[in-house]
């Protein structure tokens, strides 16, 4: 039972939120950001995914308010938007590893 009163429009927003986790590239980015802030280049090196693909997915993740970027000189450092994202990933991993 949820402690929130859910309106019809909330279901659409919640579905959009969960769709962010339905792409393996976005998940790789999020899991790597669990370890701390990273530049696009660092994420590319850790995941083996092209810069254009990482940049494209980071844009989507920023729009979905799952990551945020901080500009420092010519680099942007990305982090998870807040601690809720880390909690969701960790609970999800715990759930699938139990099965």
Image (cartoon, helix red, strand yellow):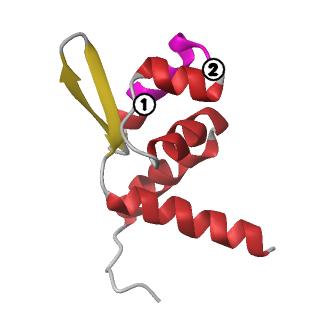
Residue at position x 24%, y 10% from top?
A: 74
* Quarter that holds the C terminus: bottom right
Residue 67 locus on image (x, y percent): 35, 40
Q: Which residue is mark 1?
A: 60
Q: Nearer the viewer, residue 56 or 39?
A: 39
Q: Nearer the viewer, residue 63 or 8?
A: 63
Q: State yes or no: discs 1 and 2 in contact (Cβ < 8 Å).
A: no
Q: Residues within 10 Å of mark 2 (few under 14, many from 20)?
A: some
Relative side of 95 to 18, left or right: right
**Cα distance between the residues tagged 1 and 2:** 16 Å
Residue 8 locus on image (x, y percent): 38, 65
Q: Quadrant of residue 37?
A: top left
Residue 59 locus on image (x, y percent): 39, 26
Q: Secondary structure at mark 1?
A: helix
Q: Which residues are magenta?
A: 49-59
User: Is 55 covered by the magenta stretch?
Assistant: yes
Q: Secondary structure at mark 2?
A: loop
Secondary structure mainly formed by the magenta segment:
helix
* Whether residue 68 is situated above or below residue 39 in the rendered picture: below
């Amino acid at each position: 039972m949820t402690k929130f009163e859910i309106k019809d429009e909330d279901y659409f927003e919640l579905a959009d939120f969960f769709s962010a986790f339905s792409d393996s590239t976005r998940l790789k980015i999020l899991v790597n950001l669990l370890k701390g802030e990273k530049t696009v280049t660092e994420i590319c090196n850790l995941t083996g995914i092209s810069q254009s693909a990482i940049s494209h997915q980071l844009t989507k993740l920023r729009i979905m308010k799952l990551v945020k970027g901080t500009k420092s000189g010519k680099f942007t450092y990305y982090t998870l938007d807040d601690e809720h994202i880390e909690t969701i990933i960790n609970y999800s991993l715990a759930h699938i590893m139990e099965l």
